[in-house]
Amino acid sequence: MKLEQFLKNNADWVKNYLDNEASYFENLSKGQTPEALYIGCSDSRVSPELFMGAAPGDIFVHRNIANVIGTDDTSVQSVIEYAVGHLKVNHIIVCGHYGCGGIQAALSGNDFGKLNPWLSHLKAVHNKHKQEIDGIENPHDQLKRFVELNVLEQVNNALENKLIKTAVDQKELKIHPWVFDLTSGKIVVL
């Protein structure tokens, strides 16, 4: 798709919303009250607003390679702080996806240069679950299970955040581990 097509698509998108509600963007600009924080992968094939059927303002989104919630990552921790502490979201969705390139890279053993420090988060997950992952004979199934285990480990990382832990303990927040299946378009709830 050419860049010019993106601009045309935007104009069509704006027209569609304004045809349905003339004050749509005026109302949208007044603030946000999303129900959920979505933490997922940056993969271009995985668009949470589309596969969740969400409209602008419904979900607060943070994406990075392989949906990592690094306890030392100021980007994701700042997003969590804002979403939980200020926006008061009721749900956090940690969503991986089958066919994740980050997961494949972490298992490959190859040198990825500047990506290596990021991939170390995933390698730590692999090392923790090495016996289970390596015990799976089919390489495709190994990758799928690694994706699932990574999501569950990132949920554990999220629970190390004091704001999240307090909100979960007070029943103000729920965390949902999901995987998006690229081959079917469906959400797999772990």
Image (cartoon, grey):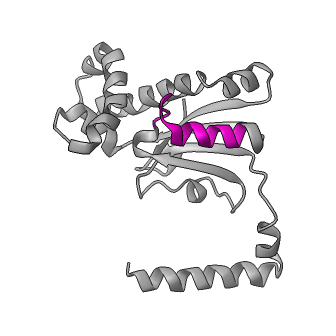
Asked if residue 11 is among those painted magenta in the image, a careful observer would answer no
Provide residue 83's location: percent of width, then percent of height: 69, 42
- Where is residue 57? Give x, y as percent: 72, 58
Q: Residue at x 54, y 22 (%)?
A: 156
* Residue drawn at (60%, 57%) of the image: 49
Q: Is residue 171 above or below residue 189?
A: above
In the figure, is residue 2 to the left or right of 50?
left
Callout count: 0
For the magenta stretch, what is the residue range? 68-84
Q: Quadrant of residue 21?
A: bottom right
Quadrant of residue 54 within the rendered picture: bottom right
- In this rendering, the answer to whether 8 lies above or below 88 is below
Quadrant showing the C terminus: top right
Q: Residue at x 41, y 40 (%)?
A: 66
Q: Which quarter of the figure has residue 79?
A: top right
Comparing 173 with 118, the one in front is: 118
Pick whichever, 25 or 104, lies toward us. Answer: 25
Please indicate, yes or no, whether residue 187 appears anywhere in the rendered image: no
